[in-house]
Amino acid sequence: MLDKWASIDHSKSIEIQNSVSQMTLDTLLRCAFSYKSNCQTANEDPYVKSVYRLAELILLRFFFPLYLIDSIFNISYHGYQFKKACDFVHNEARQVIADRRRALSLGQTKENGNKRRYLDFLDILLSTKDEDGNGLTDAEIRDEVDTFMFEGHDTTASGISWILYNLARHPEYQDKCREEIDELMEGKEEKLFEWDDLSKIPYTTMCIKESLRLHPPVPFIARKLTKSMTLPDGRTVPADQLAAVNIFACHHNANIWPDPEVYDPERFSPENMKDRPPHAFVPFAAGPRNCIGQNFAMNEIKVAIAMTIHRFVLSVDDSKPPSRTCLLVLKSKNGIHLHIKPRETM
């Protein structure tokens, strides 16, 4: 992604959401499935396009009551589009699984001539057994792969895109992040961000968290109540009901976050965080059903932001301001357009 950005016409702004989505999908495929794709070199990756369309259609069903009836939705034009996109995404997952099964059956445990240094997520799914010695079916494995491929790249791409936008809007914070990253990278011959570096960028992490507050990648979630719950106003929600949790509203609660639309990384300084309610900031949800990949996502975000800020100076294109749209994942419906210039040309 960064190499592509280095070769563009830097006199014009570029739309970054698509490039970032391709990068996070490629990262997930490599890290979770040891699978090499060409999604970053394709002009428009069909998997990313299908995932976007599925998100739009799922949200459409929520707000169009007749579509909640399967028989009506299935015979509609939108139902046809949903099936077509869903089939494509499922086939991609099946192909990843089939390729790995084939490789394992042939005893191919090496990559580029070297033994893999770790078991990836797909290896674990294929080798796991229950107490009776039965493994997961292909359908069960596909469901897990679909979840990781869908949620593991689209949400992270949203977070990275909005973080880059917020840093572009606030060059003073961008410069402070760059100073911190430059100091960390000084003396490194390959200029690569390494595992031990993840904990050494506290100010950049504050900027990342403030963007996740302002633009949470998943703006709302739902939970099924296991028992009845009484609200502060005395009303009771019965058990077995779905309760919607508006994360976007929690993150913009003026009683907890003064001037909630203002981007201020100092909200996440240690002294400002110590007395804050634990559920005031929940970009990855909370409780036993929180995001299973939140540590992976945060590490990926830190690496992506650090490497980008180290190589480029970002500024907004005021002629193309983003317009937030609340699908399953928070995006800009007209894209996020930034001027991206290599530092050596500044």
Image (cartoon, rainbow, N blue to C red):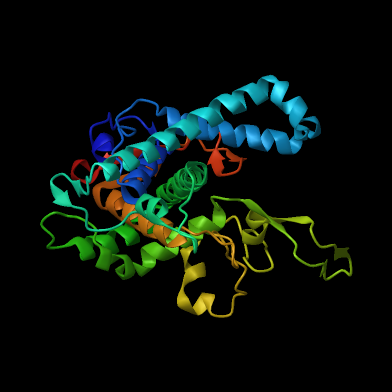
* In this picture, residue 245 sits left or right of residue 168: right
Q: In the rendered image, which quarter contains the N terminus?
A: top left
- Residue at point 28% right, 39% down? 36
Instruction: Report how many numbered discs are placed on residues in the image.
Output: 0
- Residue at point 28% right, 43% down? 105
Residue 317, image x, y percentages = 43, 36
Q: Residue furthest front?
A: 132
Observer-nearest residue: 115 or 162?
Answer: 115
Q: Is residue 338 visible?
A: no
* In this picture, residue 174 sits left or right of residue 331: left
* In this picture, residue 216 sits left or right of residue 296: right
Image quadrant assignment for residue 161: top left
- Residue at point 22% right, 49% down? 109
Observer-nearest residue: 299 or 215?
Answer: 299
Image quadrant assignment for residue 118: bottom left
Q: Is residue 76 above or below residue 37?
A: above
Q: Is residue 188 visible?
A: yes
Residue 95, image x, y percentages = 39, 34
- Residue at point 27% right, 28% down? 9
Q: Is residue 294 above or below residue 272?
A: above
Observer-nearest residue: 295 or 147?
Answer: 147
Q: Is residue 87 above or below residue 168?
A: above
